[in-house]
Amino acid sequence: MPASSPCIRLCVLDPVTGLCEGCGRNRDEIAAWGSLSEPERLRIMAGLPARLAAATPEPESEPAPALA
């Protein structure tokens, strides 16, 4: 049975956050992934959506039109 992985093959490390833009893992997690236990991989994977959301700036909203 293959190890669980969040990789979506969009492997680009953000220079500011240090996170992979595809999966949200950092360089150390990616390097150690094969040697981690399945419970540890699942624990990391559970936090990746929140990590990516926190690292992604929200789009700026447009100002409301002025009333005439």
Image: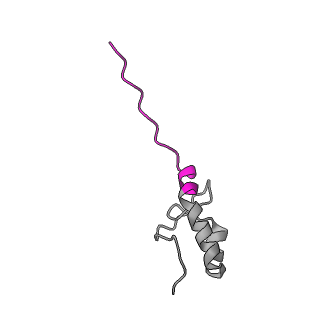
- Residue depicted at x 36% and y 22%: 65
- Residue ID at (65%, 78%): 36
Residue at 60% of width from left, 73% of height from top? 41
Residue furthest out toward the left: 68
Residue 19: quadrant of the picture = bottom right
Q: Is residue 47 magenta?
A: no
Q: Quadrant of residue 62?
A: top left
Q: What type of secondary structure mainly makes up the magenta span?
A: loop
Location of residue 30 in the rendering, given as x and y in whole percent from the top left corner: 61, 72
Q: How many marks?
A: 0
The residue lying at 42 percent from left, 27 percent from top is: 63
Q: Position of residue 39 (x, y in %)?
A: 62, 75
**Along the line of sight, which residue is nearer the eye, 50 or 62?**
50
Q: Is residue 52 left or right of residue 64?
A: right
Q: Tell me: residue 67, above or below residue 13.
A: above
54, above or below 49, in the image: above
Q: Position of residue 6 (x, y in %)?
A: 51, 70
Query: Which quadrant would the C terminus be assigned to in this image?
Result: top left
Q: Is residue 57 magenta?
A: yes
What span is in magenta? 50-68
Q: Furthest residue to the top?
A: 68
Residue 6 or residue 9, whichever sits in front: 6
Residue 29 drawn above or below residue 48: below
Q: How far across and how far down the image is residue 45, in percent? A: 57, 67
- What residue occupies the far front of the structure in this picture? 39
How is this picture coloured? one colour
Q: Is residue 48 above or below residue 40?
A: above
